[in-house]
Image (cartoon, helix red, strand yellow):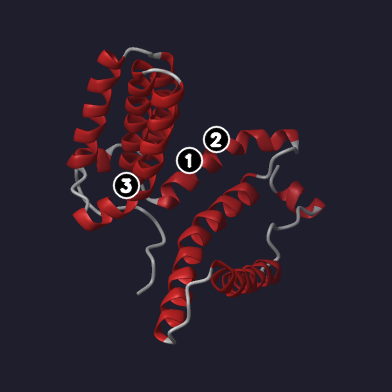
Amino acid sequence: MSAPLTLYVPGDTPLHRVPAGWKVAALPLTGVALFLVDAPVVLAPCAAVAALALGSVRAPRQRLARHLAGPLVVLVLVVAAALVFQSAATAATVGLRLLALLLAALTVTFTTRTADMLDVLDRVLRPLERTRLVNAAAVSLAVSLALRFIPEAFHRYREIREAQAARGLSGSPLALLVPLVVRVLKAADEIAAAVDARCFPPSRTPLSEEGGR
């Protein structure tokens, strides 16, 4: 079974109906606000609100657990390190802050299509094209390809691991890494060739510039 290309969970909840631009803008602002607060008494309700927001998305439990498992392990390790090297108050602050941000980020990604996020990015970068330092279309393409390759690489990894397990081979990291790198690089080369064949990004000719005036 193929890995999903996005984290988006189809639905018609109030958060699904919020425009993508508002959600994409709210996430970094939420992160800044959380890092300006040091009181666990304030951060705990923030984490609770983020948990309620994520719960309102009605994501499948297995999918939710799969996407929370890895980050929560890292979160526990960070909190443990803060508890050992600093204090319980610091550990609580760090843990609640990161937990609230993690839940908020998952809420945004579960309720926003990747295409809508890329459209927001394109609109934000479009005015910067006048400086000739940014190509909005190229940046959007790069981000979309990166998002596409994250689940693709994970899917390839699972394929290789399952194939080796079926042959009774040991799960040595090197035995997994080499074919994984080869397959991912091959896929990247194929996509690069396809993009190049479509002449992306389109060149701007004097005629096209004159016609656009």
Residue name at image x 46 percent, y 23 percent: 85
Q: Is residue 75 above or below residue 191?
A: above
Q: Position of residue 190 (x, y in %)?
A: 64, 74
Judged left or right of residue 99, residue 209 is right
Residue name at image x 42 percent, y 26 percent: 84
Q: Quadrant of residue 165?
A: bottom left
Q: Quadrant of the N terminus?
A: bottom left
Judged left or right of residue 207, residue 78 is left
Report the amino acid beneath label 1.
Answer: Val
Report the amino acid beneath label 2.
Answer: Val
Of discs 1 and 3, which sits in the foreground? 3
Q: Position of residue 174 (x, y in %)?
A: 59, 69
Residue sitting farthest toward the bottom:
167
What's the distance in space between the residues labelled 1 and 3, CA to CA? 26 Å
Number of other residues with Cα within 10 Å of mark 3, as a class: few under 14, some 14 to 19, many 20 or more = some
Q: Closer to the camera, 23 or 88?
A: 88
Q: What numbered label is drawn on residue 120? A: 1
Of discs 2 and 3, which sits in the foreground? 3
